[in-house]
Amino acid sequence: MSVDPAVHLAYVSLHLVAVGVAGSLSYWIGRHVDIPGRRWFVAWMGSFGCWSLVSAVSLLVSTQPVAAVLFVLWVLVGLAAVALTVCFATAYSGREPRENRLCQASAGVFVVLGVLAVTGPFHDVYWRSGSFRTDPFPHYAIEPGPAWIAAILFGVVAVLIFGYYFAELYFRSRRQQKRAVFVLMITPVVGFLPLVLSVFDLLVVSSYDHISYVGVINALGVSYAVVRFGSHSVGTVGRDAVINHLSDPYIAVDRQFRVVDYNEASEVFAEPSGIQLGKPLAETVPALADELLTETGLVEPTDILTLTAGDHPRHYTVTVSELTVHETATGSVLFLNDVSDLEASRRRIAQQNEQLDAFAGTVSHDLRSPLHIANGHVGLLKKTYDDDRLEEIDAAHKRMGTLLDDLLVLAREGTQVGETEPVRLDTVVEASWQQINTHEATLQTSDSQQLAADPTRLQQLLENLIRNAVEHGGPEVTVTVGTIADGFYLADDGPGIPEDERAEIFDMSYTTSPQGTGLGLHIIHQIVEGHGWDIDVIESDDGGARFEITGVEWIDHTHSPVSAS
């Protein structure tokens, strides 16, 4: 029989189409799309393209020797495609093919069957006989041998492995992703359909092996899954990295910023059509993309984001993490921590603090004015009358003034500390000493080291410590300031603090002096806390009180003696 031009052209054209599809997809994904096992995919799809190319060339030869050589080459490329099917499925599911035993076994089978194919003309193991036919077009036909049957079984096993790995992904996937995984899972199975039809003489040319067409079928299936849904495995790995039922929003995107996974909590940002897998972040979650997506990629915001979730504004902190598979960057994961309740509390506290500050200022002004008037009258009375009761009134006024000062410090500053800077300890100690009526007390200090502190608040701390020492130690008390390994101390030779009371001395209500406000030591504790330091009170070497402030950052270690009285 003669060659049928129409059938011949159809078969050659189909092979060339398969070459184009496989080659184009291999190039496009290799250069522009991030999927796990991308290099294995390029090799896998490339092998199908080569297989189809050899098939097309084989249909154009006119002599048996050339057809026989091309047939052996066709067998080798086909075996490579089968082995790479296992490797790609392994890599795409998150495993390492070079360490996978199934991939290693596939490579071994490829080598054995490849050797049998190359030596096929010298034995009957791979095929018993081969002949060059021209009906209805030129092709090489064989009578299968045991190795040929083994090669078919090799392909079947590869498809089963492929299906197993993708079935595993299928049951781990979100509902929207299952369609993509299902397509990838059944594609190789459909690819074997031409072979099955050929075996049952249901095709035009039953003597021709149609299995190489599995390449174009696989290419079309993968194209659909990748283009429509993006990289499925990016979403799977991202989901494995967090709790499946995370209460805060979570969205994973690939390197093209297409959404590949999300959880139910993130659906509060969805447009009426909902978040759609495979769609760009800017298209399916525009509010989030407007805040995070820049020309250089996703940027983690430094401030709290306010986004509309449903019908209400919500506040979020956002963490952007790079997602990698086998040390290859494949996308990013967005974690949004809903801090709406905390933000509401922060704003409420800020408003209360403003009100408290305004109240403290008003009270201070309204109380100080009559207090100044009262002090003025007491001063005039002292010039006219010599009465001890006037001294008691004057002391009460001074105590009220100190109480007002302490209340203002608590209301307006609390634990707040401004910018820290290098401060000489001895300089601040001297300045604090000058602000206190120390009577006949003596100051001893031998350190001029610099520490990192807020100068104003550090002076407040030292003033309160010195005032406390003078009030409790008497007018001739000796106050010593020195340094220790990670801080400094202030000690006195007064009566000290009983051990059973040391745990409560920083409470707001604690005082043992009739003139004390009970706020001074509490303010000290707040200033220490604001700097991130610690404070402890023990007995001094002279039996008095010793306050140790630790956790201090020293700037240098110079020393110079200072003494004042």
Image: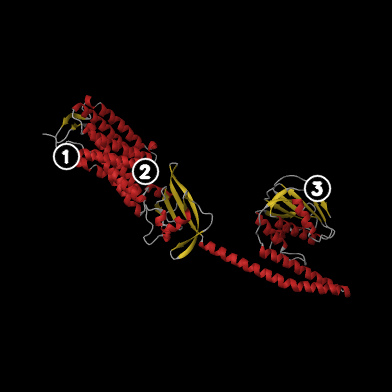
- Label 2: state its secondary structure: helix
Residue located at (75% from left, 59% from top): 463
Front disc: 1 or 3: 1
Q: Is residue 523 visible?
A: yes
Q: Which residue is mark 1?
A: 7
Residue type pointed to by label 3: Pro
The x and y percentages for residue 491 are 77, 54
Left/right placement of residue 8 relative to residue 395 reads: left
Cα–Cα gap, marks 1 and 3 = 108 Å
Residue located at (38% from left, 47% from top): 233
Q: Is residue 520 above or below residue 39?
A: below
Residue type pointed to by label 1: Val
Screen quadrant of the C terminus: bottom right
CB within 8 Å, label 1 to label 3: no
Cα–Cα gap, marks 2 and 1 = 38 Å
> Crowding near pointer 2: few (<14 within 10 Å), some, many (20+)?
many
Left/right placement of residue 353 relative to residue 289 reads: right
The disc label shown at residue 172, or none = none
- Label 3: state its secondary structure: loop
Q: Which residue is mark 3?
A: 561
The x and y percentages for residue 377 are 82, 74
**Foreground residue, 128 or 269?**
269
Q: Which residue is mark 2?
A: 92
| Badge 1 or badge 3: first in the primary sequence | 1
| Badge 2 or badge 1: first in the primary sequence | 1
Q: Is residue 56 above or below residue 239?
A: above
